[in-house]
């Protein structure tokens, strides 16, 4: 019995000594000691086992922390916020791309939550524009000229997404489930067979979708040993080449990029091409060719007989 008491005393002394040293080194270093005294050892053992499994593939320095979820995603503070719901900002904007809904309406569960559409555009570098178009998931589509857009035009929570409303616009322009915003700016940097335009204007015209980078994949099942196949691909939307050149029956196509480089394509090579917005670049996508053969930063297209 006395021997057991000595062992317990030594263990307590070691733990307390560790706590004292940890506190002396700083609050963050003291955390492991505090955890050992606060949580059940069975729980800590399970967590340690999980961590050991993680380090087989991940560097410890890149582990997720509480801040990753709480501050980066807000998962605990803002329950039921749809973090995977996105709005696509396109057209004549400095940085096109997807905007998470929780960044637009982080406090959607509070009364009178809203954000002015003009404020959203300003946050993304859009100060001057000719029009803005909003599209909803049920194929609704509205376009409002800048002169008719005021601070009363707002984005508000709707189910798992965003709705648009404006007290000084007709109620038929109000949309539920907004997923896409296209901006038309004052500049026209693109030259297409002699006339000037912009990607924002083209996205409001006839557009087409193209399947790109289609690949066959397969996997052998560990359950029954069978090999099952599928195809993976992406879809991209843009202005079809035949809709934007002066002569759809051209023999060759001259493409100039923003740096002054020239690229010549035959009619066969350009068949099915789509002029699309990819990040901050305008790209001539050639579905039948690899991405390395696409033409990036397009500035001018000339169709020739």
Image (spheres, helix red, strand yellow):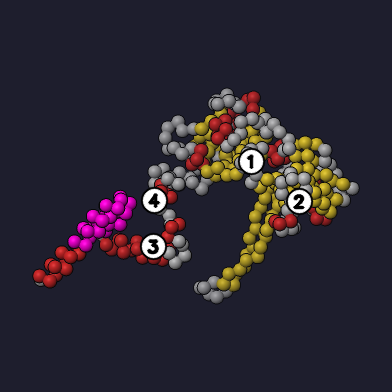
Residue sticking out furthest to the right: 305
Q: Secondary structure at mark 3?
A: helix
Residue 179 lies, with reference to residue 265, above or below; the image says above
Q: CA distance from mark 4 to mark 2?
A: 46 Å
The reply to whether discs 1 and 4 touch (Cβ–Cβ < 8 Å) is no
For disc 3, the marked residue is 51
Q: Which image quarter is the N terminus in?
A: bottom left
Front tag of 3 and 1? 3
Is the residue marked by circle 2 packed among few (<14), some (14-19), or many (20+) residues within 10 Å?
Answer: many
Dot 1 or dot 2: first in sequence order is: 1
Front tag of 4 and 2? 4
Q: Which residues are magenta?
A: 13-39
Q: CA distance from mark 2 to mark 3?
A: 49 Å
Asked if residue 141 lies in the magenta stretch, the reply is no
Residue 273's tag is: 2
For disc 1, the marked residue is 90
> What residue is shown at x 53% (from left), y 75% (from top)?
224
Residue sticking out furthest to the left: 2
């Amino acid at each position: 019995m006395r021997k057991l008491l000595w062992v317990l005393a030594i263990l307590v002394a070691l733990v307390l000594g560790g706590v004292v040293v940890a506190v002396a080194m700083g609050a963050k270093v003291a955390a492991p000691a505090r955890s050992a005294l606060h949580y059940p050892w069975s729980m800590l053992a399970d967590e340690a086992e999980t961590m050991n499994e993680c380090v087989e593939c991940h560097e410890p320095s890149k582990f997720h922390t509480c801040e990753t979820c709480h501050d980066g995603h807000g998962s605990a503070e803002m329950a039921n916020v749809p973090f995977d719901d996105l709005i696509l900002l396109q057209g004549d904007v400095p940085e096109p791309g997807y905007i998470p809904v929780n960044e637009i309406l982080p406090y959607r569960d509070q009364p009178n939550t809203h954000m002015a559409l003009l404020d959203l555009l300003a946050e993304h570098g859009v100060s001057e524009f000719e029009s803005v178009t909003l599209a909803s998931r049920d194929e609704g589509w509205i376009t409002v000229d800048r002169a008719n857009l005021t601070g009363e035009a707002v984005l508000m929570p709707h189910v798992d997404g965003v709705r648009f409303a404006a007290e000084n616009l007709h109620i038929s322009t109000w949309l539920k489930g907004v997923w896409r915003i296209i901006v038309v700016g004052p500049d026209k940097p693109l030259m297409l067979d002699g006339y000037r335009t912009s990607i924002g204007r083209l996205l409001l015209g006839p557009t087409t979708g193209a399947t790109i980078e289609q690949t066959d994949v397969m996997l052998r099942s560990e359950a029954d040993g069978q090999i099952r196949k599928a195809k993976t691909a992406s879809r991209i939307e843009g202005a079809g080449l035949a809709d934007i050149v002066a002569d759809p029956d051209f023999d060759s196509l001259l493409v100039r990029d923003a740096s002054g480089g020239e690229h010549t394509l035959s009619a066969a090579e350009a068949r099915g091409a789509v002029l699309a917005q990819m990040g901050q670049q305008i790209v001539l996508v050639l579905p039948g060719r690899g991405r390395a053969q696409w033409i990036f930063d397009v500035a001018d297209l000339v169709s020739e007989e």
